[in-house]
Image (spheres, rainbow, N blue to C red):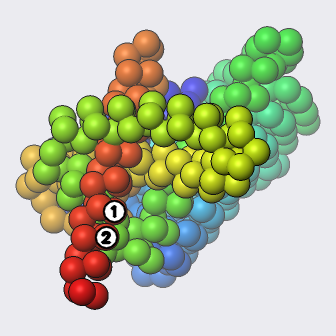
């Protein structure tokens, strides 16, 4: 389910007419006037209060209060659709709440609610922790969840409870979805608040990807060994604790810089102009999809962490040298 949503998002991003999209980004994004075009938006909170042709949204809170004449693709901490969608809804979120109509719905979330006012004219496929359907599904309703409450109607219902190993897998999938959303939001925040530092590391990623990947991988191994050795001694434990926190922080941020570099490369290839936040979102979605390729995804993940880690180290070294030189 998660892979399907990511593929759909990437497909939309790479459409030949991507240049025609209305690009919006910021901490608070609000569409208050009708837009006779597709809208691509990223931000902390994104609210659609006027009719649009279609939307692709990534953000912390996503609220759609106006009709959408095309499709909705949304990935956020909370996704709320209060109005009708003529096309399909593809949504991933911690909480997903539908009150309007749609043609098809593909949803993955921790909690999914289909309200009584909702009519899905064809099929719906839902994966989540707790799923509640009080609406009308004209076609097939497929549900994979821990808990399922069905007070609505459907042409046919295919429900399987996630129990045992399957339940654990579903829990891990939900956790992975929420973590992915969290990292997306974190990247947007860091890019907005600390743009100079973000660009500095991203430049290192682009300038020497092979060198940074090799050096980063070796530094990750060396750092882990050093921290373990220091932690084994009473005297070195405080140092190991600080080094460990910095080490984990660097690893967590590594792929965000690689995402921005990938996004910039995509924008250069497609030859269209947009803002830095949307460039980051492009790259983040692509890299998240690559991470989920069976088997190869693990190697891609390791390479991305190594590349980002190496770039961070080189960027810090360069900045440290400039600081010491200017203060001399």
Location of the N terminus by quadrant is top right
Kindly identify the residue that appears in the image at 36 percent across and 27 percent down: 300
x and y percentages locating residue 170 in the rendered image? 73, 24
* Residue 34 point in image, percent of width and height: 41, 75
Q: Is residue 299 above or below residue 215?
A: above
Q: Which mark is residue 316?
A: 1
Residue 92 visible here: no
Label 2 crowd bin: few (<14), some (14–19), many (20+), radius 10 Å: few
Question: Residue 8 vs residue 168: left or right?
Answer: left
Disc 1: CA contacts within 10 A as few (<14), some (14-19) or many (>=20):
some
- Quadrant in the picture for residue 325: bottom left
Q: Which residue, given by chain and number where applicable, does mark 2 sit on? A: 320
* Residue 144, picture quadrant: top right
Local SS, label 1? helix
Answer whether labels 1 and 2 touch (C-beta < 8 Å): yes
Q: Does the image show residue 277?
A: yes
Judge from the rendering whether residue 268 lies leftward or rightward of residue 322; answer left or right: left
Residue 152 location, quadrant: top right
The number of discs equals 2
């Amino acid at each position: 389910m998660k892979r399907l949503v990511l593929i759909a998002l990437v497909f939309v991003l790479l459409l030949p007419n991507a240049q025609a999209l209305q690009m919006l980004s910021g901490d608070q994004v609000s569409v208050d006037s009708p837009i006779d075009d597709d809208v691509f938006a990223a931000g902390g909170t994104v609210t659609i209060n006027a009719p649009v042709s279609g939307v692709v949204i990534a953000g912390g809170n996503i609220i759609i209060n106006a009709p959408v004449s095309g499709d909705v693709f949304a990935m956020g901490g909370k996704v709320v659709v209060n109005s009708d969608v003529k096309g399909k809804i593809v949504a991933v979120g911690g909480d997903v709440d539908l009150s309007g109509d749609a043609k098809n719905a593909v949803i993955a979330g921790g909690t999914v609610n289909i309200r009584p006012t909702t009519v899905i004219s064809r099929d719906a496929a839902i994966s989540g922790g707790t799923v509640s359907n009080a609406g009308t599904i004209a076609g097939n309703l497929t549900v994979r969840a821990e808990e399922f409450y069905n007070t609505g109607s459907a042409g046919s219902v295919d429900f399987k409870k996630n129990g045992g190993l399957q339940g654990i897998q579903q829990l891990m999938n939900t956790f992975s979805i929420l973590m992915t959303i969290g990292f997306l939001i974190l990247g947007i925040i860091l890019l907005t608040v600390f743009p100079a530092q973000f660009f500095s590391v991203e430049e290192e990623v682009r300038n020497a990807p092979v060198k940074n990947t090799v050096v980063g991988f070796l530094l990750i191994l060396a750092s882990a060994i050093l921290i373990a050795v220091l932690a084994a001694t009473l005297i070195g434990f405080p140092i190991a604790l600080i080094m460990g926190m910095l080490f984990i922080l660097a690893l967590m941020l590594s792929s965000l810089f690689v995402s921005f570099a990938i996004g910039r490369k995509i924008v250069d290839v497609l030859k269209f102009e947009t803002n830095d936040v949307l460039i980051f979102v492009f790259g983040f979605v692509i890299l998240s999809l690559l991470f989920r390729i069976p088997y190869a995804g693990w190697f891609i993940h390791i390479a991305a962490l190594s590349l980002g880690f190496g770039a961070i180290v080189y960027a810090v070294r360069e900045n440290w040298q400039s600081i010491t030189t200017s203060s001399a």
